[in-house]
Amino acid sequence: MNLHGKDIKIFTANSNKKVAEQIAKGLGLPVGQSEVTTFSDGEISVSIKESVRGSDVFVVQSTSHPVNNNLMELLIMCDAFKRASAGRITAVIPYFGYARQDRKSRARDPITAKLVADLIVTAGADRVLTIDLHAPQIQGFFNVPVDHLLGVPILAPYFIEKFKYCKNDIVVVSPDLGSVTRARNFAAKINAPLAIVDKRRQRANVCEVMNIIGDVKGKKVVLVDDMIDTAGTLCNAAEAVIEKGGAIEVYACATHGVLSGPAIERINNSVIKEVVLLDTIALPAEKACDKIVQIEVGHVFAQAIDRIYQDKPVSPLFG
C-alpha cells in the first residue's frame, strides 16, 4: 500500500515520547491518543483511543533499552493500526536495535537485523523511516521502502558554530576503520582534514597497538562515530590521539547514545571534553553527564514525514 492516507497522525509508544512530541510540534499536530501499558504478567497492552481509518499513521519508537520490550511495543502498535484500517503505516525508528547482527561472521550465527526487519513488515508497517543504521545494507533487509536519514548534516552545524574562530585547528578523526566513511563525510561538511585511529593486535595475548594515520599534533580533534555503546573504543581513541598523536583537545559526536554498562563512567574519566549526541535515544536521569550535549532530531523527522506524505523526495534533507 503506497498511496498516502487522508491525513497525518503521529503516535508514540514509550521509548522516546520526547521525539514524538517534537515531530508533532514540527508538523503542527497533536500526538495521537493511545496508551501502551503492561498486564500484570508483563505482556504488553496497546489501546488506540481515536479513529485512524484511512489515515497516514506514523508510529515513533526507538528500539533501544529495554530493547525487547520496545520492539514488541512497536510490533503490537503496527498490528493495531493495521487492524484499525489505517491508510498507510510508517514505522519511525530513530534508533534501530539489533542492527549489529547484520551478517554471519561465524558459523551458525543468526542475522537478527533481517529477522527484526521481517517482524516489523509482518506486523503491518508499509514503510520505515530511520536515521544512521549501524550497517546501511540493512535497508535491503526490508521488503518495503526505507527512508534512511543521516546524522552528519545535523551534527556538523554544531561544530561549525563552535569552532568558527579556530576552524583551521580542527581535525576530524575516525575512532576505527569501520567509521571512516562517516568521518570523511563529516570532515567534508566542516571543511577539515581527516585522520584515522588504526588499532591492531600484533600477536595473540598482546595488547592492541594504536596508530594514528594523519596529523593531529597541536590540533583540536573531533571523533565521529554512529553510536556510542560502552564507550571503550571512543575513550581509547581519545587517549591515543592525545598521547601518540599530540592533539591538544578531544571532542566526540555520534548519532546514537546507547551508553550501556560503564559508558558514563568511562566518558567522565576520559580526556574527552564534550560528547555531542542526537536524542534518538532518551537519556535517563541516572545517565546524566556534564560532558554530554544532546541535539534535537525531531524537526528533521518532521520534515521527512511531511515530504513522505506529499510524495516528495527525502534526499534534500541529507544536505
Image (cartoon, rainbow, N blue to C red):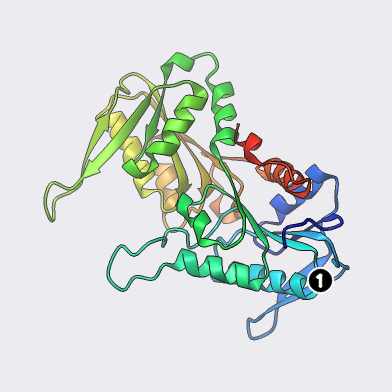
Q: Is residue 36 above or below residue 146?
A: below
Q: List the residue tagged with mark 1.
A: 85
Q: Split into 4 quadrants, where in the image is the N terminus? A: bottom right
Which type of secondary structure does the marked residue at label 1 adopt? loop
| Quarter location, residue 110 | bottom left
Q: Is residue 185 above or below residue 132?
A: above
Whole-percent x, y for residue 135 in the image: 45, 52
- In this rendering, the answer to whether 239 lies above or below 106 is above
Q: Position of residue 165 (x, y in %)?
A: 53, 13
- Say left or right for 109 vs 17: left
* Quarter holding residue 261: bottom left
- Of residues 94 and 208, the one nearer the viewer is 94
The amino acid sitting under disc 1 is Ser
**Count of labels shown?**
1
Q: Residue at image x 14%, y 51%?
A: 206
Instruction: State the image coordinates of residue 60 (x, y, percent, origin top left).
Output: 69, 58
